[in-house]
Amino acid sequence: QVQLVESGGGLVQAGGSLRLSCTASGRTFSRYAMGWFRQAPGKEREFVATISSRGIYTYYTASVKGRFTISRDNAKNTAYLQMNSLTPEDTDVYYCAARSDSSIATTERYYDYWGQGTQVTVSS
């Protein structure tokens, strides 16, 4: 069982930056690929970024490529999402997720564990 806790959300002006963190319980964090998803009220949750278990491979949705960076520190059991050049369209609840596999995935049904979410609000 893996428990995930996100932090780092908040209110930021357009053009600003935030770094989200996702800290996992347990001693097998390095075996899990990680992902970040986001969801606006009344909309389906959408994929944002994913990273393989050793951090070698990453993949981003087109709308955040070049602005967001996913990374991980397996020694700290933590994954990160660095978000730069934020726009109001990035306003969402952001969720981290872990999958019981080393390889990246962009579909939420491939993820086994989810955090509770952290709100990101970007003002114009």
Image (cartoon, rainbow, N blue to C red):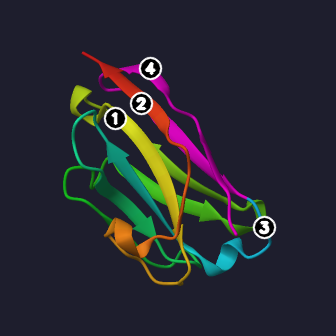
Mark 1–mark 3 distance (CA, rounded to whole Å): 28 Å
Q: Amino acid at mark 4?
A: Leu
How crowded pointer 1 is (Cα within 10 Å; few <14, some 14-19, many 20+) is rated as many
Give the extent of the magenta segment.
Answer: 1-24
Q: Amino acid at mark 3?
A: Gly
Q: In the image, which disc is placed on residue 92?
A: 1
Q: Nearer the viewer, mark 3 or mark 2?
A: 3
- At a point 22% along the width and 36% down the height, the residue shown is 42
Q: Amino acid at mark 1?
A: Asp
Mark 3–mark 2 distance (CA, rounded to whole Å): 27 Å
Mark 2–mark 4 distance (CA, rounded to whole Å): 6 Å
Q: Amino acid at mark 2?
A: Val
Q: Which residue is mark 2?
A: 120
Which of disc 4 and disc 2 is earlier in sequence? 4
Q: Is residue 57 above or below residue 2?
A: below
Mark 1–mark 2 distance (CA, rounded to whole Å): 6 Å
Mark 4–mark 1 distance (CA, rounded to whole Å): 11 Å
Q: In the image, which disc is placed on residue 11?
A: 4
